Amino acid sequence: MADNRPVLRVKGLGKTFILHQQGGLALEVIHALSFDLHPGEVLALAGPSGLGKSSILKMITGNYLCSAGSILVQDPETGEEVDVTRAAPRRILALRRRVLGHVSQFLRVIPRVPTIDIVAEPLAAFDIAPAEAKDLAATILARLNLPESLWSLPPATFSGGEKQRVNIARGLVAPYPVLLLDEPTASLDAANQAVVEELIAEKREGGVAVLGIFHDPAQRARIASRVIDLGAHAGKPVERIGGVLNHDAGLRPSHA
Amino acid sequence: MSAVLDTPLLSVRKLTHRYGSRVACRDISFDLHPGEVLAIVGESGSGKSTLLNCLSGGLPVERGVAFYRDRKGLAHDLGSLQEQDRRHLARTEWGFVRQNPRDGLRMRVSAGGNIGEPLMMVGARHYGDIRALAGDWLARVEIDPARLDDSPASFSGGMQQRLQIARNLVTAPRLVFMDEPTGGLDVSVQARLLDLLRALVADLGLAVLIVTHDLAVARLLSHRVLVMQGGDVIETGLTDQVLDDPQAPYTQLLVSSILEG
Amino acid sequence: MTSATPLAGYSYAYLDAQTKRMIRRAILKAVAVPGYQVPFGSREMPLPYGWGTGGIQLTAALIGRDDTLKVIDQGADDTTNAVSIRAFFQRTAGVKTTTRTEEASLIQTRHRIPETPLQPGQILVYQVPIPEPLRWLEPRESETRRMHAWAEYGPMHVKLYEDIARHGEIAVSYAYPVMVEGRYLMSPSPIPKFDNPKLHRSPALQLFGAGREKRIYAIPPYSDVRSLDFQDHPFRIEPHGHACALCGSTDSFLNEVVMDDTGKRMHVCSDTDYCTTRRDHLEQGEAAE
């Protein structure tokens, strides 16, 4: 049967933000976290919000640096494990193109590019011809009930829910062996939530390894094959300095 | 990744340039690979333009080394390159997009002549072909090809800049130096230009070394970024990582200074 | 005309020995690098700039007792300037002079190449007003020197491109730029475009002198000289469709002469020697009948 070696191994992960603009305040958000992720499973990260769950996903993609530990990603092409915390930037970019799909909470809007092209773009890295890529993009957008009239428009003026569906489409259209999902259904209605859950299930059945953050416990129960409670790995308590510091976002709201 | 892809296009080690006793850039080291966009960001006086000029030939490489690998795989030491070899590289493998398009165009020559000149400099001698290719490139940079015979003096600033880009890309260079290509343009014009650059860079697999003070430009166009201050590299890494998780105090200051809409 | 004794009290051919040496060195350099403009120390001559001092200095540096000199101005041996320059060398060098192209060892010319093909061993000295072919495109001497050094002739190609874009053809009728041995861009002096083909692989040594601009350049015998053009707009000479009123020639360069104020005009060969020779042959032919 399928090889069940972990595609992702997180070992002793730690993250501390040092805010120089606040006199060097140190914010530890993750402490000594270890877990493995296997093909065909949906692993949910659970815990109260503000605990740094998004940061974990971002460290895996190399968007954030790690303060401690290592993140080993199995590269299906070479069979090697790449340590994201030590890899050269080009290596990380290569992993992002073909191994690690990431659906973040926010859609980064590139001016002037139509929705359907945004969704089709990741497929180029898998040597899929533009025409076929566009068809695949259309299929998934239709499944997510995004009206066809919107496909040729850039998503800048879309609603939150529409933008999120574009984001999901872009992340799920391509055959990444690993998917990292950050609250993928937060702005969606029940019907579209169900579609997304179906898509995730299909991916899982196809052997994709999924790591996700689902804040709704019911949804988590439906989708996840395994849950990690991060409570034990939260950073040390932080003193608030007038106003709330959002741990997940790090220093500032992230536009992923 | 194959060995060929791993070979850098441009390798810089401990590049230092002084104006008299003042150090403009100090011990700069980095690699640039084919198809990679590297942004050099910093404020005025950071040394970013000096660095760009040392590598593109405007200034000599006095200390440190810089190697460029050409189409045939031959490495050229930019510090000891003969002027005619440097000009040959500049004609056949490089482009340089200047901040002010008037500095990079012949204002009294038609748009077609501006795009055709680099072709003629590398031996193109068929008028019809040159004209056709120039027309294609005008369309590619979203200028109406009917303006092929118009002088750029009659173009808007954004059009002039796009014409400069076409002039630089027509010879299919492998490395393009850009010095604040969107500086001086209206914001809406900037957005259009950046999007065009983004698409062209991706389509043509260009390696780009772009100097900018604008982090938003770096975020949109570049894979990696070098943050400079006072002549030193303060921080470097993947663009999204440096901008989303800045480590150095100066970088954090720069990032937090971006005006949020 | 036969040779005579040079004028006493003057150096042979007017120029002193050191000057001749300097000019000959410049000539050697010019011949060694075909088409490259060699700076030289242009001397004060007994006629002002703009009257052929460059050509005269070249001739003076080269001419010897065994030479036969021909001097033409716009193809004619009998204009004021041609006559004066020829007389000047008769007096200062005592050389034989001639109007026959094939008899001359040294030909000084202003703005034309003789119609009669030149032979090995002949030297053609051109009078040049503006030696720099790029001057009208780039006024800075510092820049044009760099352009020649790096063979970066973009502006010239662009100018020809612009001509075709604007006029449908290259709009240069004289001083048509050429590439010498594929390396240097050169102005052949203000000869008509019609004469350009004669520059290419000529058996003669062609020397160019600009007195005011202080430059000498050269085309060694049998050099490759190509007029600039495009593959789909090749260099060509349009037939003028006239014949010389005096000798009937249809393939020489003709001057258009206005005869009166009613607009009557006549076309006559610009090369007086060529025309005269043809007429002589025609008369002999008729006489033989």
Image (cartoon, coloured by chain):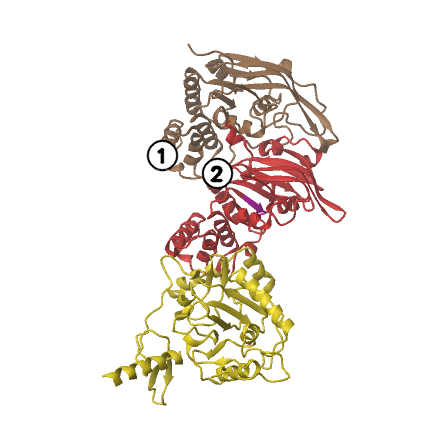
Chain bearing mark 2: B
Rendering coords of residue C75 (x, y %): 43, 78
Kindly tell me whether residue C111 is visible in this rendering: yes
- Residue extending farthest to the right is B21
Give the total number of marks visible in the rendering.
2
Q: Chain drawn brown, letter?
A: A
Residue B223 is situated, as x and y percent measured from the top left of the image, at 55, 35
Would residue A176 appear left or right of B61 to someone viewing this image?
Answer: left
Given residues A45 and C156, the one toward you in this image is C156
Q: Which mark is residue B205?
A: 2
Disc 1 marks which residue? A131
Q: Can you tell which quarter of the image residue A252 is in?
A: top right
Above or below residue A211? Residue C257 is: below
Q: Amino acid at mark 2?
A: Gly
Q: Nearer the viewer, residue B24 or A195?
A: B24
Q: Position of residue B123 (x, y in %)?
A: 45, 52
Give the colour in which the image draws chain C: yellow
Please name the color used to draw chain B: red
Q: Which mark is residue B115?
A: none
SS class, disc 2: loop
Can residue A217 be seen by looking at this rendering? no
Q: Amino acid at mark 1?
A: Ala
Q: Quadrant of the C terminus of chain B?
A: top right
Q: Does C15 sit left or right of A238 as displayed? A: left
Range shown magenta: B176-182
Q: Residue at x 50, y 39 (%)?
A: B72
Element type where label 1 sits in the image: helix
Spatial distance from mark 1 to mark 2, Cα to Cα?
20 Å
- In magenta stretch: residue C175: no
Identify whether C38 is placed above or below C264: above
